[in-house]
Image (cartoon, helix red, strand yellow):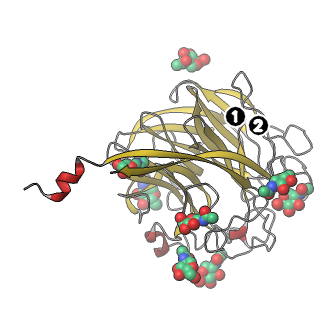
């Protein structure tokens, strides 16, 4: 006799149901999780694995940032990394507020930021790179952690040693190309101050040593930002003025290339000052508001945020959302740093595919598709 399960397999066929739903994404209402708590996951990434959206970010906690730029304490000390998931980009569930448990060993003196996660389909591993003051400002190493599921926990493995700079400065990010090759984008502290993009090995565990320079400048302060995305065969990187938790935000200088390891060309500014003015190419320090040189409380940028990423989200079979992902420091109503707003801004394109200067939207509406697999007996 055939075992029952074998017999059934002939009669079951599974198929996909697709439903569309409109969702409103707000930049002015606090983002709360399913338990009604603030989503406290900052400066990381928003990625889609299969049908689920994942936010990996830094937990800033309940401290108050006392000054208009970073104070070296609040958002520096006691950081952990959190994971929230959602099926619709609106309803978020906290999975863990400590997804790389090892950071709690020394986060009372080591600073942790910018968890970026990608899925390596060749190894079946979820790979996280993140910024750690153990390496950042010290040498050209980038922290690396892995997990067999996107839900973690992520476990540290030997870090990447990058070859396009001697000392990495303040930002690191991960970009995964369509062919599943991964690249790390970082800025350098050794002069000239560069933004470098460097190719990893197929298992993403080491650098290949192949890199290109997106941009370089001789004088301080350096540029930050660094969201990398690809649209219609063109790669984009958005860089910005140095903003150490600054409350006015930063610009979005956009560079393009048809080859990640080739030459990069400056395209345009996508984040002007809120009064429409072009920010200067150079200011004397990260404590200066480029939109209001003598006044930290003056005009902010149009998107008054420090950029950390561009989320590339296939929201339906027809549409990919390219979404600027930044932090609006000192924006929370109660002054608690973990409650600061993020800016999620859709990047819009002209008919000739050039990105348009961004506008701040209090909210925006998108249509997302959800897939369900169902079984018909
Ligand atoms: C959410 O709230 C429920 C009920 O209060 C609690 O049992 C659960 O642990 C909370 N979950 C998280 C992730 O905080
Ligand atoms: C998507 O789901 C399939 C089937 O469960 C799994 O094999 C694959 O690893 C998943 N991909 C990602 C990126 O999670
Ligand atoms: C970090 O944690 C320690 C111990 O709990 C606490 O005393 C300190 O105030 C915290 N600092 C910040 C900036 O959160
Ligand atoms: C939000 O997500 C949770 C967990 O997936 C689910 O139980 C709940 O029904 C969702 N709520 C809404 C309003 O979609
Ligand atoms: C980078 O610096 C860290 C901390 O000082 C050290 O542990 C590590 O060995 C250094 N790595 C390289 C490749 O120099
Ligand atoms: C990059 O630019 C340099 C200098 O303009 C040029 O010599 C080189 O051929 C270019 N490389 C590519 C791959 O286009
Ligand atoms: C600039 O942004 C900060 C932080 O959100 C806010 O407190 C301030 O009111 C803004 N300034 C202006 C002129 O809009
Ligand atoms: C979205 O913003 C518009 C304009 O500010 C406002 O009229 C509308 O009520 C908002 N919608 C939601 C759902 O927040």
- Left or right: 259 in relation to 152: right
Residue 215 at what x, y percent from top left? 64, 33
Q: Residues within 10 Å of mark 2 (few under 14, many from 20)?
A: many
- Left or right: 247 in relation to 41: right
Residue 317 at what x, y percent from top left? 54, 37
- Left or right: 220 in relation to 157: right
Q: Ligand 3 appears in which quadrant?
A: bottom right
Name the residue at 64% across, 35% down. 216
Q: Earlier in the sequence, mark 1 or mark 2?
A: 1
Q: Residues within 10 Å of mark 1 (few under 14, many from 20)?
A: many
Residue 359 at what x, y percent from top left? 81, 42
Number of the label disc, if any, that sits on residue 20 = none
Mark 1 CB lies closer than 8 A to ligand 6: no
In what quadrant of the picture does the N terminus appear? Answer: bottom left
Cα–Cα span, label 1 and label 2: 7 Å
Residue 189 can be seen in this image: no
Name the residue at 76% across, 56% down. 27
Instruction: From the viewer's side, name the closer residue of 57 and 65.
Output: 57
**Label 1 close to label 2 by CB (< 8 Å):** yes
Is residue 64 positioned above or below 315 on the image? below
Secondary structure beneath dot 2 equals: loop
- Left or right: 127 in relation to 229: left
Name the residue at 71% across, 41% down. 219
| Number of disc labels | 2
Number of the label disc, if any, that sits on residue 270 = 2
Name the residue at 48% across, 33% down. 211
Q: Residue furthest left?
A: 1
Secondary structure beneath dot 1 equals: strand
Number of the label disc, if any, that sits on residue 254 = 1
Residue 60 can be seen in this image: yes
Residue 229 at what x, y percent from top left? 59, 37
């Amino acid at each position: 006799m055939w075992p029952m399960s074998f017999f059934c397999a002939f009669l079951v066929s599974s198929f996909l149901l697709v439903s569309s739903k409109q969702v409103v994404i707000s930049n002015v209402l606090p983002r709360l999780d399913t338990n009604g708590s603030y989503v406290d996951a900052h400066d990381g990434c928003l990625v889609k694995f299969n049908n689920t959206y994942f936010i990996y970010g830094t937990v800033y906690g309940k401290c108050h940032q006392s000054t208009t730029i970073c104070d070296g304490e609040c958002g520096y000390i006691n950081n952990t990394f959190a994971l929230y998931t959602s099926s619709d980009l609106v309803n978020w569930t906290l999975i863990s507020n400590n997804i790389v448990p090892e950071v709690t060993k020394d986060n009372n003196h080591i600073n942790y930021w910018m968890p970026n996660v990608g899925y390596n389909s060749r190894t079946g591993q979820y790979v996280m790179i993140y910024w750690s003051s153990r390496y950042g400002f010290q040498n050209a190493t980038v922290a690396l952690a892995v997990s067999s599921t996107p839900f973690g926990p992520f476990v540290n493995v030997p870090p990447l040693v990058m070859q396009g700079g001697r000392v990495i400065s303040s930002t690191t990010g991960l970009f995964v190309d369509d062919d599943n090759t991964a690249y790390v984008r970082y800025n350098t502290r050794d002069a000239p101050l560069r933004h470098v993009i460097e190719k990893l090995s197929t298992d993403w565990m080491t650098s290949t040593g192949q890199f290109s320079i997106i941009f370089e400048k001789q004088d301080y302060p350096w540029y930050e930002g660094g969201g990398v995305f690809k649209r219609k065969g063109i790669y984009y990187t958005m860089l910005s003025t140095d903003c150490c938790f600054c409350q006015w935000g930063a610009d979005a200088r956009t560079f393009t290339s048809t080859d990640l390891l080739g030459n990069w060309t400056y395209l345009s500014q996508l984040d002007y000052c809120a009064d429409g003015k072009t920010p200067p190419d150079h200011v004397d320090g990260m404590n200066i508001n480029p939109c209001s040189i003598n006044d930290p409380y003056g005009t902010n940028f149009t998107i008054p945020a420090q950029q950390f990423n561009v989320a590339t989200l296939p929201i339906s079979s027809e549409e990919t959302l390219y979404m600027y992902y930044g932090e609006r420091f000192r924006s929370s109503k109660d002054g608690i740093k973990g409650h600061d707003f993020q800016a999620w801004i859709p990047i819009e394109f002209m008919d000739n595919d050039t990105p348009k200067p961004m506008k701040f939207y209090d909210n925006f509406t998108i249509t997302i598709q959800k897939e369900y697999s169902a079984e018909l007996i």
